[in-house]
Image: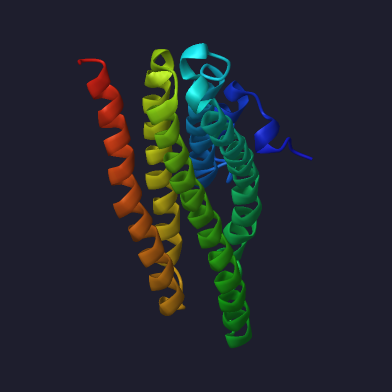
Amino acid sequence: MAEPATKLSCEEFVNVLASKAPTPGGGGAASLVGAIGMALGNMVGSLTVGKKKYADVEADVIELQKQATELQEKFIELVAKDAEVFGPLSKAYGLPKETEEEKAHKAEVMAKCLKECCEVPLEIMRTCCKAIDVIEGFAQKGSALAISDAGCGVICCKSALQAASLNVFINTKSMADRELAEKNNAEAREMLDTYCAKADAVFADVERRFFE
């Protein structure tokens, strides 16, 4: 049995990603980038807790760290989940469709697989939005010596959000159920509109503080 993507070294993950293997792919990569972004935010918390200068916000930072750790774990779970749902879809595209029965069977399998392959990147996007909110808190309350890591983290999460959206849109494009497709597209677009702007604002605030 092949090693799960989440158990690969960084070097192994990148090499498999570059190969023609069906997984990991864009969704898994997006979720891993999200995990890295959230971990960078969490590091700001680690460098803040215990410092006398930040004693008045320590309880808030500890709570942010709790949320960040949960989100890191969620992102890693979603790396594996993305690979899990994409395998059946890649096989479904190769199903025969010579007879009416085969066509009906393929359509049924494709509908199920496409639904699952949209839900995972949507969940990655939702997790990115939560991560951006948490990093905003780290940027506001964390150690000024580690503020660049909050900026790095929020941009990673923004990139993960955008990357995951493309994995939604490529699958909704193939959906026969256009009502579900448009519902998924609308949710994805709303998250992009709100949280890309929020991530940019956090990044800009971090950058501004270096030139004050």
Identify the residue at the far right of this view: 1
Residue at horizontal 39 percent and vertical 20 percent from the top: 147
Q: How is the image coloured?
A: rainbow
Foreground: 188 or 175?
A: 188
Residue 32: image quadrant is: top right
Please identify the quadrant where the C terminus is shown: top left
Q: Is residue 181 left or right of residue 124?
A: left
Identify the residue at the far bottom of this view: 100
- Residue 182 lies, with reference to residue 78, above or below; the image says below
Instruction: Give the x, y percent position of residue 169.
Output: 39, 59
Q: Is residue 4 left or right of residue 185?
A: right
Q: Is residue 103 left or right of residue 171?
A: right
- Residue 125 lies, with reference to residue 143, above or below; the image says below
Q: Is residue 40 visible?
A: no
Instruction: Give the x, y percent position of residue 65.
Output: 57, 32
Q: Is residue 52 visible?
A: yes
Residue at horizontal 40 percent and vertical 63 percent from the top: 187
Residue 140: image quadrant is: top left
Please identify the quadrant where the N terminus is shown: top right
Residue at horizontal 43 percent and vertical 42 percent from the top: 133
Residue at horizontal 65 percent and vertical 36 percent from the top: 5
Foreground: 77 or 22?
A: 77
Identify the residue at the far left of this view: 212
Foreground: 193 or 14?
A: 193
- Residue 180 lies, with reference to residue 100, above or below; the image says above
